[in-house]
Image (spheres, rainbow, N blue to C red):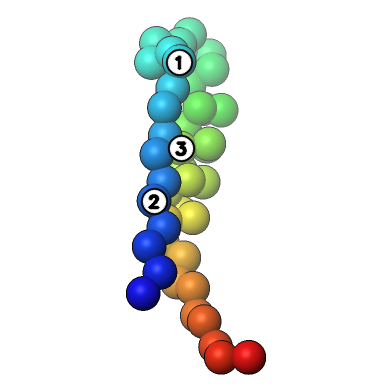
Amino acid sequence: MVTVVVEEFYKTNRLPLEDYDQFAAVINAAADFNKVRLVFRPL
């Protein structure tokens, strides 16, 4: 069994409205990464 633990911490949870789209893109990329399925094969 392989266990992968990801912890995310943000120094700031308030940001100017004009920065929201960029912030959302980063969060959505992280969410997409969490949907990845890893396939391990014996060597």
Q: Position of residue 24 (x, y in %)?
A: 47, 32
Q: SS class of the residue under badge 1?
A: loop
Q: SS class of the residue under badge 2?
A: loop
Q: Relative to the observer, which residue lies in front, 7 or 23?
A: 7
Amino acid tagged 1: Lys
Q: Which residue is mark 2?
A: 5
Q: Position of residue 7 (x, y in %)?
A: 40, 39
Q: Which residue is mark 1?
A: 11
Alpha carbon separation for disc pair 2 and 1: 20 Å
Can you name the residue that lies furthest to the right here?
43
- 28 lies above or below 24: below
- 23 lies above or below 2: above
Of callouts 2 and 1, the N-terminal one? 2
Q: Position of residue 32 (x, y in %)?
A: 46, 54
Could you say which quadrant of the image residue 1 lies in?
bottom left
Q: SS class of the residue under badge 3?
A: helix
Amino acid tagged 3: Ile
Q: Which residue is mark 3?
A: 27
Alpha carbon separation for disc pair 3 and 1: 14 Å
Of callouts 3 and 1, the N-terminal one? 1
**Residue drawn 48% across the image and 8% down it:** 16
**Residue drawn 39% across the image and 11% down it:** 14
Q: Position of residue 25 (x, y in %)?
A: 52, 37
Amino acid tagged 2: Val
Q: Is residue 8 left or right of residue 23?
A: left
